[in-house]
Image (cartoon, rainbow, N blue to C red):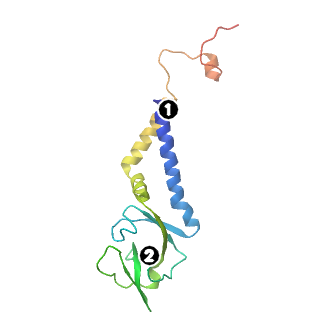
Amino acid sequence: MKKIVRTIVNVILCFLIILGLVFTLPKIAGIKPYIVLSGSMEPALPVGAVIFTDTGRTIPEKGDIITYEVKGNMITHRVVQIEEDGYITKGDANVMKDPKIAQEQVEGTVLFSIPYLGYAAIFTQNKGFLLLLAALVLLSYALDNEEVPGKQKTEKQIEGRGDRDTPEE
């Protein structure tokens, strides 16, 4: 039981570390990760994917997928038309084009995406997941420190030199 719980805790912790690295390391290079929350860009960018937007590429070309800000919300759509004073975008799955956006609203150009990774990121922010993780860590700690009632440890066991009672010479 100890081994199973410890393995589960270690796997979850490794997963969280990797997920944290995926979301923080790109920021050093000016790349921002975003989670796709709607189906407006399917099939190119499915719901639950994580997109990586290059914040250094803010002057897109026609056909580029860009991330831009509108009233505090980040939107990721394809540039379908370039105008003198901005861009017209459209979600691949949408019928209508979006209203024109200004150059200043462009956050960057999407470099690539990783399908389904966003679901994992969203799941780890869930309170239930955090409670489960805390319970597993506490259970692992409790199992590591369990003592069998009625059994006394010998001096050698306390010092970590042996598992069994051995007669003294």
Tag 2, which secondary structure? Answer: strand
Instruction: For label 1, count other residues whose C-alpha is less than 10 Å away and answer few (under 14), some (14-19) or many (20+).
Output: few
Amino acid type of the residue that numbered disc 1 sits on in the rendered structure: Lys
Total numbered circles: 2
Q: Is residue 130 above or below residue 161?
A: below
Which residue is tagged 2? 65
Q: What residue occupies the far front of the structure in this picture? A: 43
> In the image, which disc is placed on residue 3?
1
Could you tell me which residue is drawn at 39 percent across and 75 percent down? 77
Q: Measured from the top left, where is residue 38 in percent x and y?
A: 34, 67
Instruction: For label 2, count other residues whose C-alpha is less than 10 Å away and answer few (under 14), some (14-19) or many (20+).
Output: many
Q: Quadrant of residue 122?
A: bottom left
Given residues 102 and 61, the one toward you in this image is 61
Q: Measured from the top left, where is residue 29 in percent x and y?
A: 58, 68
Horizontally, is 125 left or right of 13 in the view?
Answer: left
Could you tell me which residue is drawn at 48 percent across and 30 percent down? 2
Q: Measured from the top left, where is residue 48 in percent x and y?
A: 38, 61
Given residues 8 and 146, the one toward you in this image is 8
